Image (spheres, helix red, strand yellow):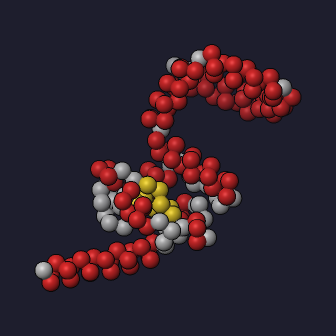
Amino acid sequence: MQSAHRKAYLKAWYEANKARYRQRYLDNREKFIARTRANYFANRDEWIKYHRAYHETHKEQWRVRTQNRSAKCRGTGTLSRDLPQKLMVAQHSRCRYCEADLAITGYHLDHAHPLAKGGLNVDSNIVLACPSCNNRKRAQTAEEFISRMVTNRLKLDNVEILT
């Protein structure tokens, strides 16, 4: 384990030499890519094992990274890495729509105002929803979905009363 002094030194050294190493990479890009590719194919099983383990231990960061990558392609903004944890605290680990316990059901990062309707991929437009609600919501706004849920519940209550 590195000492705090050593970590600080390495961080400072990296910052001081970042531009130089970036230029070296750009000048020899094909060589770096070929070396990395050869290393991957020579140690493919270890690479796969490492990446699977990383994915299992960093699920929330992976979700945010995936959404940021998709949003970057669309040009609609990026999310902060600690957003799922912040939303879990703010929503008391409950689904935004049905109040289900997200610790049990799991969760999806949902756009309150959908990207399909011009919403942005920014922290203020994201809520946590259970997979069931998020899949049923599709491209509706939060208000549209909640009003549809209330209407459907009223219909179900009336059917139960009539029978």
Residue at the extreme left of the image, as rendered: 163
Can I make out residue 86 in this image?
A: no
Residue at the image point whose x is 51% and y is 47% from the top: 63
Query: Where's residue 121, x and y in %?
Result: 59, 60
Residue found 46% across the figure and 41% down from its top:
59
Q: Residue at x 67, y 53 (%)?
A: 72
Q: In this view, does 66 lie above or below 89?
A: above
Q: Quadrant of residue 34?
A: top right
Residue at the image point whose x is 58% and y is 21% from the top: 44
- The answer to whether residue 45 shows anywhere in this view is yes
Residue most extreme to the right: 27
Q: Is residue 105 above or below residue 28?
A: below
Q: Which of 88 and 128 is in front in this view?
A: 128
Position of residue 135 relative to residue 58, above or below, is below
Q: Which residue is outermost to the front? A: 163
In the rendered view, would you say 53 is above or below 82?
above
Q: Quadrant of the C terminus?
A: bottom left
Q: Residue 52, image x and y in percent? A: 48, 31
- Residue 35, image x and y in percent? 73, 20
Which of the 4 quarters of the picture holds residue 149? bottom left
